[in-house]
Image (cartoon, rainbow, N blue to C red):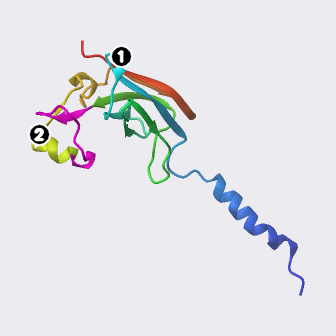
């Protein structure tokens, strides 16, 4: 028996249909540099959250490296960032005594609750009750060279 030639196209159509389905992860990536008074803001947490709290666009965050660089890439396991206007919240938690970030960043929440850490970034940049002073408009695709400038004075 000769198979129906149309059956050969079913797997191809299935793959194309899956490729067209939009999963999670949004379609926005962000990279840039955070500074504090013009110097790299190392080991800080950068959070992008929608300015419009009623918005259905996602929120996401990243840690900066030693040079203040950060990157957020789409992740299919999360809603992720979508085009829109985001408020940027910034925190940098350091040991009260040594003024250095904790060695294990996974311990930050416990150390904060224990009162061992302080945020060295002015509160206005992290206040969850107000819109932060830094806003960024993100578009589909890559959003490179985003500059996050924190001022202490």
Task: Give the residue displayed 50% in from the left and 47% down from the top.
Answer: 25
In this rendering, the answer to whether 153 lies above or below 22 is above
Task: Identify the element where label 2 is drawn.
Answer: loop
Instruction: Point out which mark residue 116 bears.
Output: 2
In the structure shown, which secondary structural element does the residue marked by tag 1 occupy? loop
Image location of residue 92, percent across then percent down: 26, 32
* Quadrant placement of the C terminus: top left
In which quadrant of the rendered view does residue 70 lie?
Answer: top left
The residue that disc 1 covers is 38
- Is residue 94 magenta-colored? yes
Query: Percent from the top left, x then y, of residue 140?
Result: 57, 34
Q: Nearer the viewer, residue 51 or 152?
A: 152
Q: Is the magenta stretch mostly helix, strand or loop?
A: loop
Is residue 42 visible from the viewing direction of this image? yes
Does 105 sit left or right of 50 as displayed? left
The quadrant of the rendering that contains the N terminus is: bottom right
Left or right placement of residue 134 versus residue 103 in this view:
right
Residue positioned 43% across, 39% down in the render? 56
Q: Residue 118: give x, y in percent of width and height.
A: 16, 32
Question: Are the two marked residues, 1 and 2, in contact with CB atoms closer than 8 angstroms?
Answer: no
Q: Which residue is drawn at 27% across and 31% down?
A: 91
Query: Which range is magenta?
Result: 92-107
| Rendering quarter of residue 62 | top left
Spot the residue most to the bottom: 1
> What crowding class fits label 1: few (fewer than 14 Cα within 10 Å), some (14-19), or many (20 or more)?
few
Residue 140 seen from this side? no
Q: Viewed as shown, does residue 119 lie left or right of 18?
A: left
Residue sitting at the far right: 2
The answer to whether 123 is drawn above or below residue 17 in the figure is above
Q: Which residue is nearer to you in this view: 91 or 16?
A: 91
């Amino acid at each position: 028996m000769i198979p129906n030639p149309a059956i050969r196209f079913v797997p191809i159509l299935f793959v194309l249909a899956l490729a067209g389905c939009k999963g999670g992860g949004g379609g926005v990536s962000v990279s840039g540099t955070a500074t504090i008074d013009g110097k790299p803001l190392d080991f800080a947490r950068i959070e992008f959250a929608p300015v419009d709290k009623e918005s259905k666009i996602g929120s996401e965050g990243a840690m900066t490296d030693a040079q203040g660089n950060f990157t957020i890439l789409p992740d299919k396991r999360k809603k992720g960032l979508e085009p829109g206007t985001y408020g940027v919240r910034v925190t940098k938690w350091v040991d009260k005594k040594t003024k250095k970030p904790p060695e294990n960043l996974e311990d930050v929440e416990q150390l904060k609750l224990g009162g061992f850490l302080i945020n060295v970034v002015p509160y206005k940049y992290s206040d969850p009750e107000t819109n932060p002073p830094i806003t960024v408009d993100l578009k589909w695709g890559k959003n490179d060279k985003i500059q996050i400038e924190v001022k202490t004075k």
